[in-house]
Image: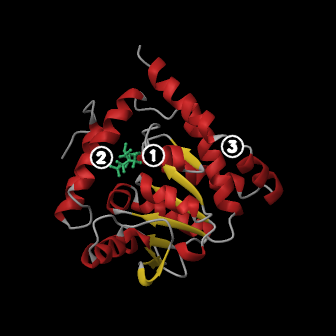
């Protein structure tokens, strides 16, 4: 048990989630490396959500609410870090989940699915070898026809650059959460939320609830007005200036 008063309580809590995820066969060992890289960038953010992340959370919420067929694409890290929050977003948007992992394993896909369901998810799709997106060589090209194949907006919390790029080339709008503003995912996505996923998800839920009261035209304008490159530059400058 980590005492809540520990100065690195939140960091230790999330490390434990990833380590337990590996023990339970939900997260891959490579997920540890990705998480470590994320932690390093969180230091640069001062472990706080910046105004730039808040802006992209707004644009992401607007894009998700106005989507015709939004889908939430999940991997082992996002499934163990924020399963309840993702389930709530899925309900708010009536959006299905689709499991998509780099290190192909049916067994792990099922474990991720069961973990999401245990945490409140309902509609969880798996990739189907009969359907694939273009411009991607790895097994991650396989998709579900009721999920990513027909999606216009794909929410990919924690993603790799290749797949983000391929989704965009398949004419999908992509919303990513990536605390590294220099990653290829961050640069290729339509909207990148540069923040720790554990802080960004509760804010995204709050924003979706608020924005659902707005009309679609206003939301579409907000989403269109988002300049991702400018936002990434702002996030990076924020990190560089954050040193006390
Ligand atoms: P690229 O997008 O450049 O191809 P990559 O494929 O090497 O990057 P991964 O190793 O798949 O990236 O890691 C995914 C990304 O997620 C990393 O950029 C990492 O900084 C980020 N990340 C890891 N943990 C978190 C977290 N808790 N919140 C937000 N982002 C995170």
Q: Give the vertical position of 11 relative to 78 (above or below).
A: above
Question: Callout 1: helix, strand or loop?
Answer: helix
How far is mark 1 from mark 3, CA to CA? 18 Å
Given this view, does label 1 or label 2 mark the residue nearer the observer? 1
Q: Which residue is mark 1?
A: 184
Q: Give the vertical position of 205 relative to 124 (above or below).
A: above
Q: Position of residue 179 (x, y in %)?
A: 43, 40
Of labels 1 and 3, earlier in sequence is 1
In the orientation shown, which residue stands out farthest toward the top? Answer: 244
Q: Position of residue 46 (x, y in %)?
A: 41, 27
Question: Callout 3: helix, strand or loop?
Answer: loop
Relative to 159, is 23 on the left or the right?
left
Residue drawn at the location 55% of the way across and 68% of the way down: 71
How far is mark 1 from mark 2, CA to CA? 16 Å
Q: Give the vertical position of 6 relative to 13 (above or below).
A: above
Relative to 113, is 146 on the left or the right?
right
> How many other residues sit within 10 Å of disc 2, few (<14), some (14-19) or many (≥20)?
some
The image quadrant that residue 212 belongs to is: bottom right
The image quadrant that residue 169 belongs to is: bottom right
Kindly tell me whether mark 2's CB lies below 8 Å from ligand 1.
Answer: yes
Kindly tell me whether mark 1's CB lies below 8 Å from ligand 1.
Answer: yes
Residue 150 appearing in the image: yes
Residue drawn at the location 60% of the way across and 51% of the way down: 190
Considering depth in this image, is 164 or 61 the residue closer to the camera? 164
In the orientation shown, which residue stands out farthest toward the bottom? Answer: 130
Of labels 1 and 2, earlier in sequence is 2
> How many other residues sit within 10 Å of disc 1, few (<14), some (14-19) or many (≥20)?
some
Q: Which residue is mark 2?
A: 35
Residue drawn at the location 21% of the way across and 67% of the way down: 25
């Amino acid at each position: 048990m980590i005492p809540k008063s520990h100065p690195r309580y939140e960091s230790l809590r999330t490390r434990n989630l990833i380590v337990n995820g590996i023990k339970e066969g939900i997260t891959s060992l490579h997920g540890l490396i990705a998480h470590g890289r994320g932690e390093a960038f969180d230091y640069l953010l001062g472990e706080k959500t910046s105004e730039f992340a808040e802006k992209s959370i707004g644009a992401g919420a607007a894009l998700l609410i106005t989507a015709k067929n939004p889908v939430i694409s999940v991997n082992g890290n996002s499934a163990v870090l924020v399963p309840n929050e993702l389930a709530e977003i899925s309900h708010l948007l009536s959006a299905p989940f689709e499991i998509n992992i780099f290190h192909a394993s049916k067994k792990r896909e099922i474990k991720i699915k069961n973990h999401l369901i245990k945490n409140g998810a309902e509609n969880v799709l798996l990739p189907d070898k009969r359907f694939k997106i273009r411009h991607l060589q790895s097994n991650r090209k396989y998709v579900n026809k009721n999920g990513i194949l027909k999606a216009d907006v794909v929410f990919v919390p924690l993603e790799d650059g290749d797949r983000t790029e391929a989704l965009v080339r398949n004419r999908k709008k992509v919303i990513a959460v990536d605390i590294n503003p220099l990653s290829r995912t961050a640069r290729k996505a339509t909207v990148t939320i540069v923040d720790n996923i554990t802080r960004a998800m509760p804010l995204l839920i709050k924003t979706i609830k608020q924005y659902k009261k707005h009309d679609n035209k206003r939301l579409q304008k907000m989403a269109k007005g988002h300049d991702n490159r400018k936002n990434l530059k702002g996030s990076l400058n924020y990190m560089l200036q954050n040193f006390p």
